[in-house]
Every structure is written in structure tokens, then in C-alpha cells.
Image (spheres, rainbow, N blue to C red):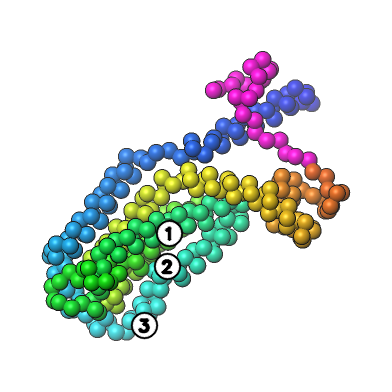
Amino acid sequence: MRSQRTTGSLLERELDREFEEQPPSRERWRPLSRTHKILFAITLVAYATIIVAVFSTSRLVAFDWEVMKWKPYEHWPAVWDFLNYYVIAGQRGPAAIVVSAWLGWRSWRTKSWRPLLVLGVSLVLLNMSVGAVKIGTGRLGPHYAHIYGSNEIFLGGDIFPSGHTANAVVTWGVVAYLATRWRRTGAGLAAWAGLSIGATTVYLGTHWVTDVLAGWAAGALVLLILPLFEPIITSADERMCRFWSERISPWLRERLGERGDHWTRGGGSADGTSTGGRSGSDQIRTPLPTPRDHRKIPAHAKRSVPIIS
């Protein structure tokens, strides 16, 4: 049989291991890797190059007009109806609703607000960055073009870069970003969604080719910069989970009685313990042991494992 000292040492070791695996929020995320920084720099340069090409009415603008004159939607009329509905997958509202529903389920399963917070932060970054360029350029779309060969900027439009394309890249890219299984498959499907929706907008004649190129770059930049916001997302997640357990869960139990327990972690109380079918003052709450900070343990305390500071 295990002695009391041996059992206590094993428990203490498990608590120390759990504490070491969960460092403070500011230390949980490593800086961006060198490869990540290179990809971000290349994408940023490509984005800036496309913007300069549009402003300078370069050969890319001439290519825009050639594609517009070719009128792709007249060459394959059989797929027009399908693609006209398919492009909705790139609209901010419908795509965000579908992805939010799935991420909401993920949040409920993992008892964490992180999936929804990641989506929210990515959409804010997308709207701020793409919206600023749209307002700054004021470009008109192919259907509203006035002068052949013109870049159609500063005319009050909002077509550059393509919002459908950038939103498809970011929204479906977040799904792959948060995937724990089948991440490569999710990344492939997200890439296909971004590429196909961008090409569809060109086929329908709602965007120039340069709009789509800029949309791909803008969406990729949001995904590449998203890891820098992970410490903020983690801190917000911890605060929201703490507020839920300390304020919302007790209120639900008070209002709903035993039914309110289903809204808490594992059907238990706010501190994570089971109520055992009791309600009100008859509930027996036995708090679970929590990891201890080794910096608060006296130096003279006897331990079975060394302390690493």
C-alpha cells in the first residue's frame, strides 16, 4: 500500500506538472518564425505592388480591360446560375453566420471562447484593412467603368480590393487555423474557397482581375498577422471564462435550479464540482486542488522533486 507521504508526493508532482504546462498568458505564444516573417513580407510586397500597379495604370490595368471585353459570363452561360449562388459563400454576412455557428459549437465543446474570439479579431482586422483601401481608392467596377483603359479610381466606388475574395480567404482560413484534426485538409479547402470565389467574381464581371489579386493578398495578410494577437485573445478568453463561472453560472443556477447545472462545466457548480443531484443549501461542494505557484512555496518545505525557477 502507498504511504501517505508517497501519495502526497505524487499529487504534488502532478500539480507542479500541470502548472508548468500552463504558464502565464504572455509567455504561451512564441514569436513568429523566420519562415512566417518571410511569407508575411512577400505577401505585403505583393499587395503593395498591386496597389501601385493600379494607381499607375500599368499593364495589369490593361489586362483588366481585356478580360472585361472578353466577357467570361457569355462563354459558359450554363454555369452562371450556379456560380451566382456559389459566390455567396464569400459574402461577409452569410459566411460569418455559418462559420460562427460551427465555432460556437466548438466553444461549447471546449468550454472556451477562443474560437469565437479568433473569428471576431480576424473580421475586425479584415474590415479595417480592406475597408481603408476601398475608401482610399474609390475604384469603380467593370459594370460602371467610364473610360476605356482607365484605372477607374477616385470615382466613389468600393470595388478594390475584392471584399468577397478577402472575406473568403479569412473566414474559411480561420476554420483551418483553429482545426485540431484534418488541418491540412481544412487548409486545402480554405485555399480552394478563396481561389474559386475570387475567380467567380471575375467570371460574373463584378470585379477586375486586380481586385481579386489584391483580395487574395489582403486576406492572406490578415491570417499571417493573426498569431500576433493570440496573447490578447488568450487573456480575453480567461477573463470571459472567469466572468461566466463567477457571475453567469450562479445566476443560471439560481434562476433555473437543477436545469441551470447543464450550463456549467460538466453539469456541475461554478468551481467545477458536481452537485450530486442536490440543490440549494444541500449541495456539497468539495473544491478541486489547484496548481500552486512554486514561487509561493517556502524554501524549507520538503519536496520529493526539485524546484526549477
Q: Nearer the viewer, mark 1 or mark 3?
A: 1
Residue at 36% x, 79% y: name it: 84
Instruction: Report which quarter residue 38 is drawn in.
Output: top left
Residue 298: x and y in percent read 66, 19
Q: Quadrant of the C terminus?
A: top right
Instruction: Report which quarter residue 66 is drawn in.
Output: bottom left
Q: Is residue 189 above or below residue 232?
A: below
Residue at 65% x, 33% y: name it: 291
Of helix, strand and loop, which one carries label 1? helix
Amino acid at pointer 2: Arg
Residue at 24% x, 82% y: name it: 75
Mark 2–mark 1 CB contact (< 8 Å): yes
Amino acid at pointer 3: Asp
For label 3, the residue is 81
Q: Provide the residue span drawn in magenta.
A: 286-309
Amino acid at pointer 1: Leu
Image side of residue 142 versus residue 35, left or right: left
Asked if residue 182 can be seen in this view, the reply is no
Image side of residue 268 versus residue 291, left or right: right
Between discs 3 and 2, the one toward the N terminus: 3
Asked if residue 131 can be seen in this view, the reply is yes
For label 2, the residue is 92
Q: Is residue 116 above or below residue 65?
A: above
Q: Residue furthest right?
A: 282
Residue 282: x and y in percent read 87, 49
Image side of residue 56 versus residue 32, left or right: left
Residue 15: x and y in percent read 65, 32
Cα distance, mark 1 to mark 3?
29 Å
Residue 273: x and y in percent read 74, 45
For label 1, the residue is 123
Between discs 1 and 3, the one toward the N terminus: 3
